[in-house]
Image: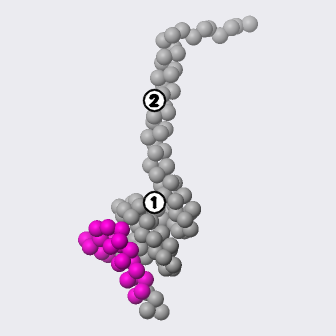
Amino acid sequence: MNDPAPLDGSSLVVGFGLGFLCAISLLGMFAPFGWVFATWMKCFLTGGGVSLVHIIGMLLRRSPVSLIVDAHHALIQSGRASNVALVERTYIANRHRIQTLGDLIELSTKALDAKEAAK
């Protein structure tokens, strides 16, 4: 029988080096998806009802996802029937006026009141 050749020191170092480079490459490729998944998980666990597709859409529109999601959660926790699309539309329409989370919540509350009054 043919026994495999024993590994020498240089083969072992090259193998570990290639493995390390592969691990760093995979981590670099999947790190942004980890942030998107963590944001989605936060929404799911707090009952926000925001889909992964919507989060990716906000990223592509360059909207501040964490600000919009936090404002959406604050509106839900205060008992308002809010959806994240309305909060994002409010942010886009008033981008120049919003400096804090409180500003976005206030403007979103006004938009919800106007929407309910129109019914």
Identify which residue is drawn at 46% across, 88% down.
116
Circle 2 is placed at which residue position?
Answer: 21
Secondary structure at badge 2 equals helix
**Res. 31 in view:** yes
Q: Which residues are magenta?
A: 92-114
Identify which residue is drawn at 51% across, 10% down.
9
Q: Main secondary structure of the magenta part?
A: helix
Numbered label attached to residue 110: none
Q: Amino acid at mark 1?
A: Ile
Question: First in sequence: mark 2 or mark 1?
Answer: 2
Q: Amino acid at mark 2?
A: Leu
Across and down, in percent, residue 58 comes to 41, 63
Q: Residue furthest front?
A: 78
**98 inside magenta stretch:** yes
Secondary structure at badge 1 equals helix
Left or right placement of residue 12 versus residue 102 in this view: right
Residue situated in front as seen by the camera: 57 or 104: 104
Neighbour tally class for label 1: few under 14, some 14-19, many 20 plus, Cα within 10 Å: some
Identify which residue is drawn at 40% across, 80% down.
109
Left or right placement of residue 104 versus residue 20 in this view: left
Q: Residue furthest right?
A: 1
